[in-house]
Image (spheres, rainbow, N blue to C red):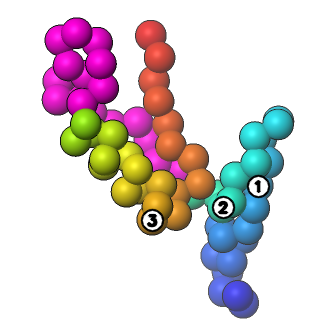
Amino acid sequence: MSSKYANLFTPFKIGGLSLKNRFHMSAMGGNDVILPDGSFWDKSAEYYLERARGGVGLSGRVRR
């Protein structure tokens, strides 16, 4: 690829973590992500799996 953004599609390494590209999807969500018992909602899991299948190199998650 000869565009000025070609570097975005190249593999990248952060410490011991290897990523297939340099795209990052920020953590998102609200009250519909986690169920009252603390488990992850199936629809939310499907959403993130689809993003990964689409080519996102890294997905963020905020831990508190």
Q: Which residue is mark 2?
A: 21
Kindly identify which numbered label has been placed on residue 54.
Answer: 3
Of the image marks 1 and 3, the number of the one nearer the N terminus = 1
Q: Is residue 38 magenta?
A: yes
Q: Is residue 16 above or below residue 49?
A: above
Give how far apart the Cα atoms at labels 1 and 3 are.
17 Å
Badge 2: residue crowd in 10 Å (few <14, some 14–19, many ≥20): some
- Which is nearer the N-term, disc 2 or disc 1? 1
Tell me where residue 23 appears, x and y as whole percent: 57, 57
**The one of 49 and 4 positioned closer to us in this rendering:** 49
> How far separated are the C-alphas under marks 2 and 1?
6 Å
Give the numbered dot on residue 28.
none
Amino acid type at mark 2 = Asn
Residue ID at (22%, 9%): 37
The amino acid on which the numbered mark 1 sits, given as a three-letter code, is Phe
Q: Secondary structure at mark 1?
A: strand
The stretch drawn in magenta includes residue 56: no
Residue bounds of the magenta highlight: 24-41
Q: Are marks 3 and 2 in contact (CB under 8 Å)?
A: no
Q: Is residue 33 above or below residue 11?
A: above
In which quadrant of the rendered view does residue 32 lie? Answer: top left
Q: Of the two numbered discs 3 and 2 on the same chain, state the one appearing first in sequence.
A: 2
Q: Is residue 1 above or below residue 19?
A: below
Residue 10 point in image, percent of width and height: 73, 68
Residue identifier under label 1: 12
Relative to 15, is 12 above or below? below
Q: Is residue 41 left or right of residue 1?
A: left
